[in-house]
Image: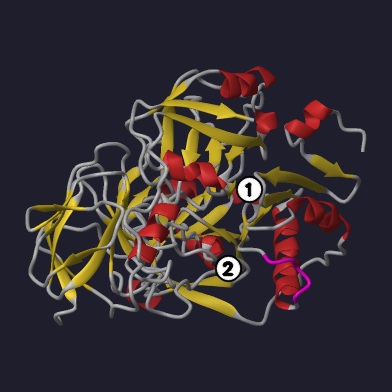
Amino acid sequence: MSRTRAEADRNTPVRHGTSGVTTRLVGEHALLVELDSGAAVEALHAVLLQRRETGELPPVREIVPAARTVLLDGLADPRTLAATIPTWDVPELPARAPETVELPVRYEGPDLAEVAALWGVAVDEVARIHAGTEFRVAFCGFAPGFGYLTGLPERYAVPRRATPRTAVPSGSVALAGPYTGVYPRSSPGGWQLIGTTDAVLWDHTRVPAALLSPGTRVRFVPAGVEARA
Amino acid sequence: MTDSAFAVLRAGALTTVQDLGRAGHAHLGVPRSGALDEPAARLANRLVGNADSAAVLETTLSGCALRPRRTVTAAVTGAPCPVRVDGRPVAWGAPVRVPAGAVLDVGAVAAGVRSYVALGGGVAVEPVLGSRSTDLLSGLGPAPLVDGAVLPLGAENGPHARVDVAPQPAPPTELVLRVTFGPRADWCTPQSLKTLTTRAYRVSPASNRIGLRTEGPALERAVHGELPSEGLVLGAVQVPPDGRPVVFLADHPTTGGYPVVAVVREPDLWAAAQAVPGTRLRFVV
């Protein structure tokens, strides 16, 4: 390596050749692995979990996938892992998984018309498109049990609301950017609300507490359609 | 409720139940939480004969007053403060015996921010995801103490430590936080990184268990795009839009979308927990 002293002091990120992987040291005991796409994050995350399961990964306290990164926190030696991960063979994820969590949704959120306008479709179409999509939990954050679900085509990305709501009801099914999320409990929020589910996303007395965790496949099923027909 | 419990006579400004936190659930959006001044919490537990992982009370500036229903050994550590049993002064930083029905009064701090009150047997509220800590960001764990609340006590273990007064670091008059740059140091200008590690800051009154906020020169970003949310660690120094660095403490969010330009070494965070607003603050490499 021909890094200068100043670069080393700044823990300059290291781009690993053509692997599409950039590693960034986070303090003395953590490592941020940055990838080119959400799909690459999900694939690496799956491999990390597998390697932890089989004991091929050094002890790590947290493995936190996000939009373009995976954080490994609580490592004894992040530098060695930073050099190793880019050499791994990371297979693409299978397109379909056998187990899918189904969430019944009433598509009657207050922002349904606005989302329909943004998508350039009729209001009824929003539910059809959304419920016809296979989602995957890319990562969790914001609140315990809040998953960032990917699966909608890029053209259906929507901006956050200009003014966030001070209270979004628990169970709200919402859109922001490329993501769909379900509010596990009432909280302030700026996402566009398209529906409501009665599914319990988070219950700390349940095992597992979170209904959705990174990697979970999700399908939204319109509920109460007959009642409205 | 059984006799193995205590009543809260005076909850104080903010008193929470804390242990060593609920690590291992960050991927579900669950913060780590736990005592901000961890060595002080561990010491308080050892003084009363508890395991280090037992739950203690973390007070904020104004202390609290408790009435145990059974005789209990107690110890107060962290921010120094007057400690009284039924009005009689007793030692701070040492095990004291509180008879059943007596009042343990943990007074306002003489210095520092957070005192830790360990009770023999520990605060035995129901754990959530393996921890009894109150998490003020996501609302997990027991609610902050309120006047009149009654909390359960565990069974007292063995003999307490035989010490007079345990040595503890004094709360900082100047807070020096050692940092390593990264992971997003490249999102700030080199000049700003120099500003961070050469200029003086002060601890902002807006600081809390989520983060230590600062007052001082704003840092300038070199990259102005949006950063997709990414995982955060304890001690992360994040640069929000106003440019004033925030140091994340135990109740920090698990992911965030502002660049983290440096990370504070974990042992320095214990002093950060005891730095009162207005304390001079320096970041050093």
Q: Quadrant of residue A129?
A: bottom right
Q: Which amino acid is tagged 2?
A: Gly
- Which residue is depicted at the point 37% across and 75% down? A224
Magenta stretch contains residue B284: no
Q: Dot 1 surroundings within 10 Å: few (below 14), some, or many (20 or more)?
A: few
Left or right? Give the position of A82 relative to A219.
right
Residue A56 among those drawn in magenta: yes
Kindly identify the residue that appears in the image at 79 percent across and 34 percent down. A8
Q: Chain of mark 1?
A: A
The foreground one among B235 and B57 is: B57
Residue A61 visible, this angle: yes
| Residue that badge 2 annotates | A132
Per the rendered image, the range of residues in magenta is A55-59
Chain containing the residue with disc 2: A
Quadrant, the N terminus of chain B: bottom left
Q: Which residue is mark 1?
A: A155
